[in-house]
Image (cartoon, helix red, strand yellow):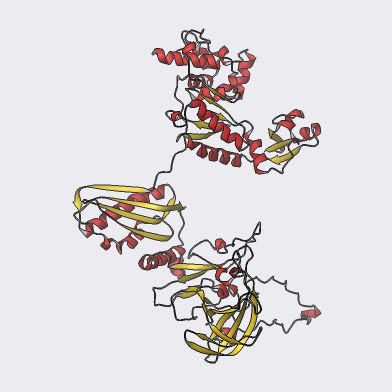
Amino acid sequence: MYVWLPNFAMTLARLKRPRLAKRREPLALLEKHGTVRRIAALDGPAIEAGLYLHQPLADALAVCPKLVTADADPAAEADARAALALWAQRYTPATAPAPSGLWLDITGCAHLVGDEDELADDLLGRLEARGITARAAIAPTFGAAFALAHHAERYVIAGDFAAAVCAPSPLSQQATLFESEEDRRVEAGLAALLAPLPVERLRIANKTASVLRKLGLYTIGDVLPLPRASLARRFPDLLPQLDKALGRADEAIDFLREPTPWLERLRFAEPLAAPEDIERVTRALLDMLCRRLERERHGGLTFEVSFFRADGGVEGQTVTTALPCRDPARVMRLFREKLPLIDPGFGIDSAMIFASRVEPLEARQSNILRKVQGEASLEDLAALIDGIENRFGEGRVYRFAPRESHMPERAVARLPALADAAAAFVVAETPRLAAQEKEAAPFALCEAPRGAMPELRSSNAGSQDYSGASLSPQKGEAIAATRALACAGRKPSAHAARGGETPSRQPEISPSRGKAGPKGRRAQKQPATEPSPWELLPERPVRLFTRPHPIDVTAALPDAPPMLFRWRKVVHRIVRADGPERIASEWWRALRDEDREVRDYYRVESAHGMRFWVYREGEYGGERPPRWYLHGVFA
């Protein structure tokens, strides 16, 4: 079966850019030939205006001054046809994109829809519903289907050739190459259907078709009675295409195929049970898989090894890597710690390794001076992260990136430790049509087991180090690096470097500002850099609770900071306070009444020197009484 998509480039342009031109406005797609721009595709109004394909743009504008033009995109057109070929797999697993349509091998598949008529009608109906014009033909050969589809009103089915036996055949007695009567009947039927079609439908070169027309051979029926020897000498590309159309030669179509899974398997004559045998089999499987990954320039991120026992049980272990990897020795080091957990039972009959996550990986050139310079490469850092994650659990090593949200609990996102730095900024689901990209310093956090203190370190040498921040880990606490990210890239002051409080933001005045430089010239004014939105935020704690803790507060009304509050049965008296900082809820998220309450945040310090970040939710005099919460603790 062949599905012809007439003028698909113009159809795609109209669907992707509906505002490009009005419905009855002439539109043309252009391609560049050397220094001349020519027409590559036309719509109906442009053809009615007298334009034609491959016409220079200057000539086209002279004929039709109101012509709307756009650049042709062959790559997007090819991708669209490939996507349609994948969509067409609902009818048959054997589909492929063609230069002007789709190939479908529906052998044995038509009964799943009903019959061939219902299949063709359903396929064309679905394409037309999406605004795609299509014609189709079903024939015993792809060449015949291609030719018939270009002359079908909607679709053509060439399936019954019973009348072809009685009809006069355009074939010569020497032309047929089949011995069986059934094959000759099909050949004669195809010849009768293709005879009135132009020779261009045989998919021959334009030069060959032009010469045939000069010789008076306009249709396929004019070519069929001619001797094959003379046609082969004069037109080398004619006979192969004619034989494919009549079924005399097979035609190879590169159908879309499911990617081969990254899997290797070994079977054993005798069951294995010794630990050293399990390790040796794992290494052999890794060597086989990594050779294939290297051959196809890919690397694995997740490797799963499975051992199938004689009693029907399956034992397996999984390791992950921070970066795509195809080094069997490196992956084997990760498996070596987990293989002792394999229970062979009564023996292992077979083993399998599967790379469930695979990404492209090009070969890298290592730095021969790295050991001399004492610099750790990215691979060394990835190996360290792999060892930590495979020992303490996947996802224990990560980093934070700012996310565009005013709500503190939504202001950060957790990313893989070695993710692309360009993807460090995660845009929240805001009602904006497009979000501006922002830069953020990459941070990595190693989350230790429960009971140990997480450690936060910036990968930028010039940024502040917040590893000294400490807070007793409690159940339900989360890490929120909002303040750390807000200060990323800023040079810490001497007071901050000594571990004191962050000084208030006062404008730094240069002592030489406004004074004349050497030789009486005024010093050049440095261009003002626009501060990042994160730098304009007030001071925030490094760590936030996953859920704010309710507290009992004694405060003067209405907007005074708390004088004391009770948290975890301990009373904290406030000696210093700063605020309020009002944060309103995000209107596109506030679906419930309680989510629409505003928050007034205060930074307070107790008599014991502890600093807290508390907020009041709601306002006095409202429908609901205000409630106080503790959201975080400063270092």
Q: Quadrant of residue 392?
A: bottom left
Left or right: residue 194 compared with residue 33: left
Q: How many marks?
A: 0
What residue do we see at 58% from left, 85% from top?
Answer: 604
Tell me, yes or no, if residue 72 can be seen here: no
Left or right: residue 524 compared with residue 469: right
Viewer-closest of 64 and 136: 136
* Residue 204, position as x, y percentages in the image: 56, 23
Viewer-closest of 148 and 546: 546
Left or right: residue 619 compared with residue 568: right
Q: Is residue 532 above or below residue 610?
A: above
Q: Is residue 126 above or below residue 439?
A: above
What residue do we see at 51% from left, 28% from top?
Answer: 118
Q: Residue furthest front?
A: 623
* Residue 353, position as x, y percentages in the image: 33, 52
Left or right: residue 355 compared with residue 267: right
Viewer-closest of 494 and 525: 494
Tell me, yes or no, if residue 7 can be seen here: yes
* Residue 24, position as x, y percentages in the image: 75, 35
